[in-house]
Image (tube, rainbow, N blue to C red):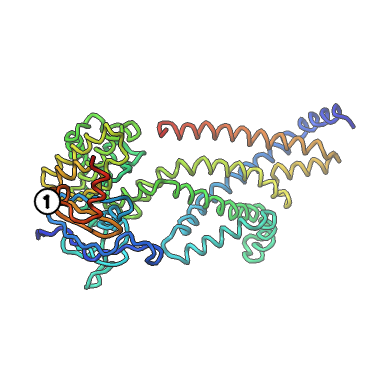
Amino acid sequence: MNFATIGQNIVKLTIKYWDKFLITGMQYTISLAALTVGVGAVIGALIALLRMSRIAPFRWIAAVYTEIIRGTPMLLQLYLFYFALPQLIPFLNKKQYLCVAIALICNSAAYVSEIIRSGIQAVDIGQTEAARSLGMNQSLTMTQIILPQAIKNILPALGNEFIMIIKDTSLASTFFIGDLMTQCLLIKGATYLTMEPLIMVAVIYFVLTFVLTKLLGVFERRLRRGDVR
Amino acid sequence: METYDKLIQVKNLKKHYNKGVIKALDGVTLDINKGDVIVIIGPSGSGKSSLLRSLNLLEEPTEGTILFEGVDITKKKDSNGKKLDIDKHRQKMGMVFQHFNLFPHKTILQNMTVAPIKVKGVPQAEAEKKALELLGRVGLADRAGAYPIQLSGGQKQRVAIVRALAMEPDVMLFDEPTSALDPEMVGEVLDVMKKLAKTGMTMVVVTHEMGFAKEVGNRVIFMDEGKILEEGSPDAIFNHPQNPRLKDFLSKVLY
C-alpha cells in the first residue's frame, strides 16, 4: 500500500460512487442540518423567551433543559431519542430519520436559545431604557428596538451553528440515516477499503463547511456595513 | 383636565441595594411644580441620577411615594385595585440620557416618530410633520434621513431631546446630558435646554454644568449620600451656601 494507490483508489471510487452514494449523502446531510437549524431556531427562540421570562418557573424549566442538553453527549441523546421516542409515540415507529431529526433539533434548540439570549442581552440596556422612557411597553420595546439590533448578533452565530450541525449530523450515521458518513460506511462495506472512503467524505465535509464559512463571512460583513462605532 | 400646581411630589423616597447596605437614596422629599427648572448637583454617587431615574420608575424605589399628576406611581395597584399603567405616565415624562441612547437602526426621523406612532397612535404623516418641525427648532431638519452614527455627539443629544419632546411630555428629565460630550459641543446642547426652559417646560436636570444651574435653574438642589442637604435659589446655593459639604463641593467645582 502506498500513496499512489490510495490516490488512484480515491479517484476511482469517487467516479464510481459519486452519483449513487456521495450526492445522496450530501443531500441527506444538508437537508438534515437545514431542518435541524430551521426548526431548532424556532424552538430555541421560544426557549430563549422562557429563559428571559419574568415568571421564575419558566426560567427554571428553560435553564434546566438547556443545561441538561449541553451537559450530556450528543451521541447519547441520539440513542435515547432513537430508542425511546418510538416506544413513547407509536407514530414514530420505524421512522428513524424523523427520530434522529428530532434528537438533533432538541440538541440544537438548546444551543440556539443561548445564541438568541446572548444576542438580545448584548444590546445596550440604554436602548431598553430609552424605549421604555418614551412610553413603549415591553413587547413594543422588544419588537421595535431590541430585536432588530439583536438580529445582527444572532444571525452570524446561527450560521456557525449550521456549520457545526453539518458536522454533527455525521453522528446520525450510527443509525444509517443516509447522510455522508453513512455513505462512507456503505462504500467501505462494498469495497473493503477503509481509508479511501474516509478521506473522500472528509474532503466533501471540508469543502461544504469551508464554502459556508466564507459565504457567512461575506454575509456578516454586509450586516455590519454602516454601523461602525 | 385637572391642572396640578405640584406636578411631582416625592415623599421620603428610599432606594437601597444589598438589603440596605448601600443607600442610593435615603429619604428624599421634593415637590416639583409646574414650570420649575430644577437643577440637581452633587458629587458622583450622591444619588442624583437614582433620584431622577426613580421619577419615571426606571429604578424601582425601595420605599416612599412619588405622586405624578396626583397618581402614586410607586403603587402597582391603586385603591380600587386598578393596575397602574406606568407606560401611560412615562409618555408624559420625557427623558434624556447621558449616552443619548438613540436607536442606531432607525433614521433620525424614525427615532422621533416610532413612539408617537406606535404608542399614541398618531398618524405617520402627522408624526413626521411634527418631528421635522421639532428638528428645525434645533437646527437639524436637514439630517432627518441620517442615521445616528452619522451625527456628532452634540447633534445626537439635540435629537434625543426633541425625540422626547415629540411625545409632548409634561416634564423633561435630563440625566447628565452633557457629560459624554466633547467640550466644544456642550454649548449647543445647553442652548437647546435654555430655549426649552424659556418655553415654560418643567425640567429636572442632573448636571455638572454649574453655569447652567446658575443661569437657567430656578431651584438648585444639592445632594450627597442619598439625601438632599440643601435646596434654594441659584443665588442662595452658589453665593451663600450653608452646608459645609456644599461649601466643600463648590470649592472643588467652581474655579
Report the front residue among A194 and B83.
Answer: B83
Dot 1: chain letter: B
Residue drawn at point x = 69 percent, y = 40 percent:
A25
Q: Amino acid at mark 1?
A: Gly
Instruction: Please state which of residues A59 and A199 is positioned toward the viewer in this rendering.
Output: A59
Q: Residue at x 35, y 47 (%)?
A: A126
Label 1 environment density (alpha carbons within 10 Å; few <14, some 14–19, many ≥20):
some
Position of residue B34 relative to residue A227, above or below, is below
Where residue A125 appears, as percent x and y from the top left, is: 38, 49
Q: Position of residue A22 (x, y in %)?
A: 71, 37
Left/right of residue A198 with respect to residue A38 in the rendered view: right
Q: Residue at x 49, y 32 (%)?
A: A221
Q: Is residue B176 left or right of residue A207?
A: left
Q: Position of residue A169 (x, y in %)?
A: 66, 47
- Pointer 1 residue: B35
Visible residue check, residue A218 = yes
List the single residue furthest toward the bottom. B80
Q: Is residue B110 above or below residue B40?
A: above
What residue do we see at 32% from left, 58% from top?
B59
